[in-house]
Amino acid sequence: MEMPIVKVGIREFRAHLPQYLMTSLPIAITRHEETIGFYIPTKHHHDKAEVDTIF
């Protein structure tokens, strides 16, 4: 079973970086509709309450 890849623009990724870092889905980062890189999480992240204590 393939895991879906979320596509987001570089500005969107940068603006919402903390939320994207909490996801467990791979993210394709694009600029001008061309994929320039990927964010691939290495493990499942903590729940939101734990993340809120970090920020």
Image (spheres, rainbow, N blue to C red):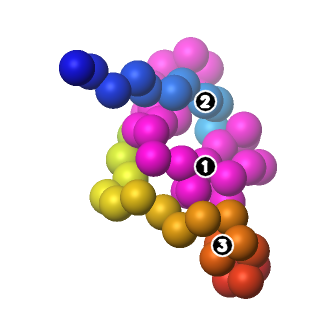
Give the residue number, with chain letter if any, for mark 2: 8
Give the residue at x 34% y 60%.
43
Instruction: Tell me if 35 is positioned left or right of 49 in this view.
Output: left
Residue 4 seen anywhere in this rendered image of the structure: yes
- Indicate which disc, 3 or 1, sits on the residue closer to the N terminus: 1
Residue 2 found in image quarter: top left
Which numbered tag is attached to residue 20? 1
Which SS class for mark 3?
helix
Of all residues, the one furthest to the left in this rendering is 1
Q: Are marks 1 and 2 in contact (CB under 8 Å)?
A: yes
Q: Which residues are magenta?
A: 11-37
Give the residue number, with chain letter if any, for mark 3: 51
Give the residue at x 51% y 27%.
6
- Indicate which disc, 1 or 2, sits on the residue closer to the N terminus: 2
Please state which amino acid type lies under the numbered disc 2: Val
Q: How far apart, in angstroms, are the residues tagged by discs 1 and 2? A: 10 Å
